[in-house]
Image (cartoon, grey):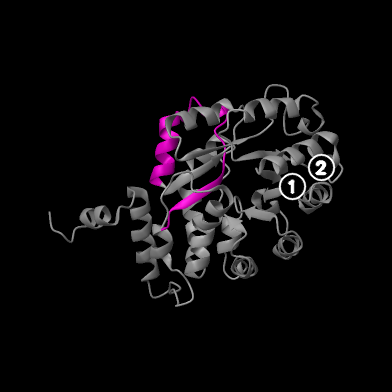
Amino acid sequence: MSVHSPTHSRQRLGLPPAVWVLAVALVAASSSPAAAQPTAATAGPAFAAALPLVDAHVHYSAAAWSQFPAHEVLGKLEAAGVRLALVSSSPDDGTLTLYGLDARRILPVLRPYREGVTSGNWMHDQATLAYLRERLARGIYGGLGEVHLGTAEEADTPVVRGVAALAAQRGLLLHVHADAPPIQAIFDHTPGVRILWGHAGMVTPPERVRAMLERHPRLWAELSFRESEVAAEPEGAAWRALLTDHADRFLVGSDTYANGRWAAYDGIISGHRRYLAQLPPEVARAIAYGNAVRLVGDHGVKFP
């Protein structure tokens, strides 16, 4: 085999096969006369394709267990270049299964959802705090959530106050799927908590996300379901400016809440690499893995 063969080059770089294929495809696309060429201010496709990632929003819930066995899920993470995944599941057993197979790659995050307790009623469930404390005794969790809150009133129940206080006391991230008002309500009653804002609010516009980040220094946002918006031309310019201005506050996320998301996992991660390619290299690195490592540690994983 020639020393200049693609396989030899991939092996020398230590890239997973799927990441290598993405790198080649992105470089080829960028070489087209019609393609936008990277500038000195942007990372470019090849740089983005080679970045190791932390996926801050993964679920391995019961519906996925038969269709996507745990070893296959771990293979998907490896193939996509995801070195560390923050995983919460309904029930928690799914997370524990993955953790048992790859304790270095999987950082468990504990959500209150279990039999009879769902996204619609957890904030009123009086047994939730005892359940969380019992599970946290394992000493393996890096956060609480993902939890869903629809209104500021839901974010101000005694249960939510207790969960936020527990996260603050234990130094755990609280991963919250909500628009801005519930996030504000949590900070009003528990200013010491660190919140990971799911989907950067999902439908919250970038200017509102910017205002929240500038108001709350203990707020970070993950970008699941936002990757197409951020990469869009020219519509994503406001998002990319926000990511550049607050490069230390954003994380990558996939949100594998349904089996279709696992089926499309490689494409979802490729979508995040597209906007990373449009950002300055130091910003791309921070969002790809640096911010997550600063928030939860490297979990024994080597990052550049």
- x and y percentages locating residue 25 in the rendered image: 36, 60
Give residue 234's quadrant in the image: bottom right
- The residue carrying pointer 2 sits among few (fewer than 14), some (14 to 19) or many (20 or more) residues within 10 Å by Cα, namely many
Does 200 appear in magenta? no
Q: Secondary structure at mark 2?
A: helix
Q: Is residue 166 left or right of residue 10?
A: right
In the image, which residues are magenta? 51-79
Q: Which mark is residue 117?
A: none
Q: On the image, numbered disc 1 is attached to which residue? A: 178
Q: For the residue marked with disc 1, what is the amino acid?
A: Ala
- x and y percentages locating residue 156 in the rendered image: 85, 41
Work out whether residue 7 or residue 304 is closer to the camera in this orientation and state it. 304
Image depth: mark 1 or mark 2 in front: 2
Q: Which mark is residue 155?
A: 2
Does 73 appear in magenta? yes
Q: Secondary structure at mark 1?
A: loop
**Residue at position x 48%, y 62% in the image:** 285
| Structural distance between the alpha carbons of marks 1 and 2 | 9 Å
Considering the image in quadrants, where does the C terminus appear? bottom left
- x and y percentages locating residue 163 in the rendered image: 75, 37
Task: Name the outermost residue toward the bottom.
Answer: 40
229 to 89, vertically: above or below? below
252 to 247, vertically: above or below? above
Task: Name the outermost residue toward the front.
Answer: 169
Task: Name the outermost residue toward the top.
Answer: 115
259 to 210, vertically: above or below? above
Work out whether residue 226 or residue 34 is closer to the camera in this orientation and state it. 226
Q: For the residue marked with disc 2, what is the amino acid?
A: Ala
**Total numbered badges shown on the rendered structure:** 2
Is there a contact, CB below 8 Å, between mark 1 and mark 2? yes
**Residue at position x 64%, y 67% in the image:** 242
- x and y percentages locating residue 30 in the rendered image: 39, 69
